[in-house]
Image (cartoon, rainbow, N blue to C red):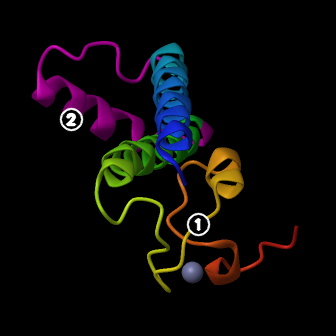
Amino acid sequence: MNDQQRLKLKRLIRARIALLEEVLGDIGTITSRKHPEEVESAHLDISDSSVESEIVGNTERELTRLKLNLQWLDSEEGGACERCGGEISYARLETAPDTWLCAACTEPKGE
Ligand SMILES: [Zn+2]
């Protein structure tokens, strides 16, 4: 991966993060980010509700991974597979910017 591709990926990840945060806002779970405690209580409130909380959970997990990958891309290990250390192709990261594994290390999900 060259620097230009790295920059492009980071832009892509930031855009995805913004989108997901907007989705979370739309669902109305995290309406206020003023205090961490409020966000925390919002989490507790939604844990009881059905489908919404699942969507929120998935979205939040993806958000966390995306934010970690943003830092990861800046580090020396950025772009290297978590499991085998091999380089993850730019094309793969572009399609799945929240992945930490190369194609070979990812278990097929019946695609
Ligand atoms: Zn690998």
- Give whichever of discs 1 and 2 has the lower sequence position: 2
What's the magenta region? 28-51
Image mark for residue 88: 1
Amino acid found under the numbered disc labelled 2: Glu
Q: Which marked residue is nearer to the observer: mark 1 or mark 2?
A: 1
Instruction: Choose between 101 and 26: the one closer to the eye.
Output: 101
In the depicted structure, whether residue 83 falls above or below residue 58: below
x, y percent for residue 96 = 64, 51
Amino acid found under the numbered disc labelled 1: Ile
Q: Residue visible at 32% across and 48% down?
A: 74
Instruction: Choose between 49 and 88: the one closer to the eye.
Output: 88
Task: Work out how far the residue at label 1 is from the one at label 2, CA to CA, in angstroms.
Answer: 35 Å
Q: Residue visible at 71% across and 52% down?
A: 91
Per the image, the residue denoted by label 2 is 40
x, y percent for residue 22 = 50, 17
Q: Residue visible at 36% across and 42% down?
A: 67
Quadrant where the N terminus sits is bottom right
Dot 2 alpha-carbon crowd within 10 angstroms: few under 14, some 14 to 19, many 20 or more: few
x, y percent for residue 45 = 33, 34
